Amino acid sequence: MGSGLSSLGVAMVIVGAVVLAVALVTLITALPMVSYMGYYHCMGMMCGSMFYYPLILPLTLLIIGLVLMALPFTLLRQNSGIGGSSTNASPQPTGKGLDVLKLLPRQEREVLEYIIKSGGEVYQYQVMRDLNE
């Protein structure tokens, strides 16, 4: 993966910006409605705290837009290893993960142990060359 955002990430940021703009427009138009409904307290079925209902859609869109804009950058940060462990270190299974190997037939267990010892990535010819009996 490259050092920048993928095309999907760029699309998510653009969609997030559009959703954020729609949220801000609906929020601006909902605030006078909430003020008007709050001033007159009871307007038919809009008694009590129900006059805040016009804010549900704008605030929901605002949250969705922010998440859509932040998600690609968060994923990019995780993939580049910033603020976390290095992505070059290969994970080594421990504990219960190795107990499963005991259930496999001998040849399959040897292949999986070879793959684990090799860091998780090997070519088929390497497995055949080193484990050929």
Image: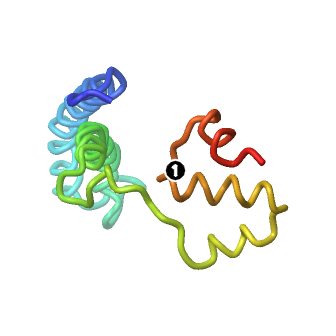
Q: Position of residue 7 (x, y in %)?
A: 33, 20
Name the residue located 74 percent from the left edge and 60 percent from the top edge: 109
Mark 1, residue position: 120
Q: Position of residue 67 (x, y in %)?
A: 29, 45
Q: Is 95 positioned to the left or the right of 27 in the image?
A: right
Q: Secondary structure at mark 1?
A: loop
In the depicted view, which residue is nearer to us: 42 or 77?
77
- 63 w.r.t. 89: above or below: above
Q: Quadrant of residue 94?
A: bottom right
Name the residue located 65 percent from the left edge and 39 percent from the top edge: 129
Q: Quadrant of residue 64?
A: top left
Q: Quadrant of residue 71?
A: top left
Which amino acid does the dot numbered 1 rest on?
Answer: Gly
- Extreme residue in the right direction: 105
- 17 w.r.t. 109: above or below: above
In the depicted view, which residue is nearer to us: 114 or 60?
114
Q: Quadrant of the N terminus?
A: top left
Q: Is 17 positioned to the left or the right of 124 in the image?
A: left
